[in-house]
Image: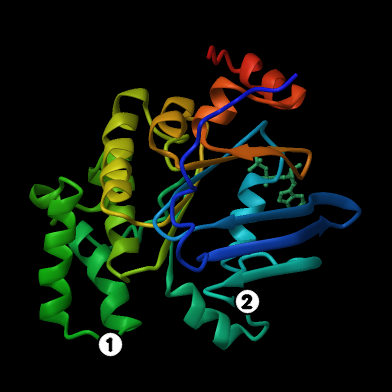
Amino acid sequence: MSHQVTSSPRKGADSPPVVVYEDVRKMYGEFVALDGVTVQVNKGEVMCLIGPSGSGKSTLLRCTNALEEINGGKILFDGKALPKSEPEMRKIRRRMGMVFQNFELFPHKNALENVATGPITVLGMAPEQARQRALVLLEKVGLSDKAQNFPANLSGGQQQRVAIARALAMEPEVMLFDEPTSALDPETIGEVLSVMKRLADEGMTMVVVTHEMAFARQVANWVVVFDHGKVVEQGTPEQVFEHPTQARTRDFLGHIGWHA
Ligand code: ADP
């Protein structure tokens, strides 16, 4: 059966890819967490990784900034294989923003200090300049009135927006989001997703592990479906959500109650 989908070229196809995964393999002991993953992230695109829990999505993100070492294949960032040495990898990590499920803010620093610290200590920026920029970034995520609040006095959604501002302060070339809304109360999920959508609209390259299918459908330019450490299917959101070609994609979407 053939299905005709009229599609424009993939976003960013005219620039060199930002991240390329070639036959990536990751083992935890005998367990194969990533089993020959080949995908690429184009410049300016939002790539959403979806699929059942335990299918390897977060592992791929953690391998991207070498929080985990791969056992086979290659990951290229900006055209070059990730370095093996820790000092070289630290330089690469600065160019990738990471946003975690549990925010991981510094609990003893207020929102402003959380955002300003990286540029001061890592980039050597003058403290006053870093604080000015932190204020601009907090405004961007809608939190200029919370600059003095400590994490304990912010809602989950507000903490996650501080975490996004903190990652942006390092002026990353790509932002990696590991289930950024799954630890949030339902009423604060929307505010985080709308900040992410704004970033996407500004052209930030983003890789997002998410269970928010409506977000993936509306904001992603490219969707990758994982199952048991493998890429089952990838394509535009329209292709994957409305015309999935693989039974395992249909099973997953059916299981979570997605109706095309
Ligand atoms: P997903 O993000 O799709 O939910 P993960 O990438 O977190 O899945 O996990 C993939 C698989 O690898 C899971 O079965 C998980 O239990 C396993 N795994 C993840 N991290 C570790 C680890 N540090 N040690 C052993 N197994 C792990």
Where residue 43 appears, as percent x and y from the top left, is 43, 61
SS label for mark 2: loop
- How many marks overall? 2
Q: Nearer the viewer, residue 204 or 132?
A: 204
In primary-sequence order, the first of circles 1 and 2 is 2
Where residue 260 appears, as percent x and y from the top left, is 53, 14
Query: In the drawing, what numbered circle is on residue 183?
Result: none
Q: Quadrant of the N terminus?
A: top right
Q: Image quadrant of residue 89?
A: bottom right
Whether residue 239 sits left or right of residue 117 in the image: it is: right
Q: Residue at x 31, y 70 (%)?
A: 171
Q: Residue at x 76, y 44 (%)?
A: 230
Label 2: which residue? Answer: 82
SS label for mark 1: loop
Whether residue 26 sits left or right of residue 119 in the image: it is: right
Q: Residue at x 18, y 62 (%)?
A: 112
Q: Residues within 10 Å of mark 2 (few under 14, many from 20)?
A: some
Tag nearer the camera, 1 or 2: 2
What's the residue type where badge 2 is placed?
Leu
Q: CA distance from mark 1 to mark 2?
A: 24 Å
Whether residue 42 can be seen here = yes
Whether residue 60 sits left or right of residue 194 in the image: it is: right
Q: Residues within 10 Å of mark 1 (few under 14, many from 20)?
A: few
Q: Nearer the viewer, residue 212 or 113?
A: 212
Label 1: which residue? Answer: 124
What's the residue type where badge 1 is placed?
Gly
Where residue 201 appears, as percent x and y from the top left, is 28, 47
